[in-house]
Image (cartoon, grey):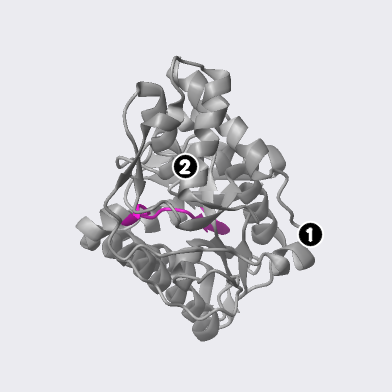
Amino acid sequence: MQTILITGGAGFIGSNFIPFFLSANTNFKVVNLDLLTYAGDLQNLHAVEKNTRYTFVKGDICDRKLVENLFQKYNFNGVIHFAAESHVDNSIKSPDAFVKTNVFGTFNVLDVARNFWMHGPNQYKKGFKSSRFHHISTDEVYGSLGESGLFTEQTPYAPNSPYSASKASSDFLVRSYFHTYGMNVVTTNCSNNYGPKQHAEKLIPTIIRKAISGEAIPIYGDGKNIRDWLYVEDHCKGINLVFQQGKAGQTYNIGGKNERDNLSIATTICKILDELKPKKNTYKEQITFVPDRAGHDFRYAIDATKVEKELHWSADENFESGIKKTIDWYLKKEQ
């Protein structure tokens, strides 16, 4: 039985991934290290809290002694690193927290893993030759696209927010540990995730929440900014494949091929709510345009050809099916 460390597992993607991973991999135990900041919620992991192969530890990835002690106690032979500050608006207001967690925190876990698994460059200790560090990143490190084109694994980095800059920095640290030390690392860069358990501050939960409460639904600028939307469970399947089968030192882009602008996202959600939870006036009347975000990237879109061809991954949900499942989940939560 192998034991892996998952950082940030009480957050949105991590809390969807852990139940999926435990179900798909019965030969693994999971230790979830999470500081439970505002974005982490143990209620998201209620389904696995009594699972004998699951352990939760509250703590900070920046606490080196804690991370070292956990490696000694549990003998980890894998890390899947989700933990990160991820909300762009928050990074504009308080960039220091993003540098600390996303850059230093990543370095901390990465370096502890290297020291625990390796004698020196390209020299793994006995029993740890297959140990792997999987870094979860974002398409935002590539910057902004125009009306055409897609991000590939060869797209030059051009981060435009403190958040994406901090993630780009962590990506480069992970890359350097492969090229310098021969460490078994992989990185996945995903497009915008949506689905159950997402924090209320994000776009889709905000639209749903505001609509139901009868408040104004805020849309930045003219609502024409475009994102490629990926249902979170499809992302979890991709992460599992890359962790198990990806080639060391490689990056894999995971995207949903579901480009939508923010205004169409809002109108789609309003239309579904009109059907599921009808009221006197259409929810669309609550859409309100607000001043645009500083440095707001126009468009993101991922080319997932590499992970599709090499690892045979594909998304099961299109946007229409995924957003319906997401709205259903939030409506049940509101009850």
Which amino acid, by three-letter code, is at mark 1?
His
Q: Residues within 10 Å of mark 2 (few under 14, many from 20)?
A: many
Range shown magenta: 75-88
For residue 232, side relative to residue 157 (left or right): right
Where residue 36 appears, x then y in whole percent? 33, 40
The residue that appears at 57% across and 19% down in the rendered structure is 276
Q: Earlier in the sequence, mark 2 or mark 1?
A: 2
> Which class describes the residues within 10 Å of circle 1: few (<14), some (14-19), or many (20+)?
few
Residue 117 belongs to magenta span: no
Question: Which residue is under mark 2?
Answer: 12
Residue 196 in view of the camera: no
Q: Position of residue 149 (x, y in %)?
A: 60, 73
Tell me what residue is drawn at x 71 percent, y 64 percent: 307
Residue where numbered disc 1 is placed = 312
Majority secondary structure of magenta residues: loop
Q: Quadrant of the C terminus?
A: top left
Does 282 sit above or below residue 20? Answer: above
Amino acid type assigned to the residue bearing label 2 in the image:
Phe
Residue 76: say if magenta: yes
For residue 38, say whether it is visible: yes
Q: Are marks 2 and 1 in contact (CB under 8 Å)?
A: no
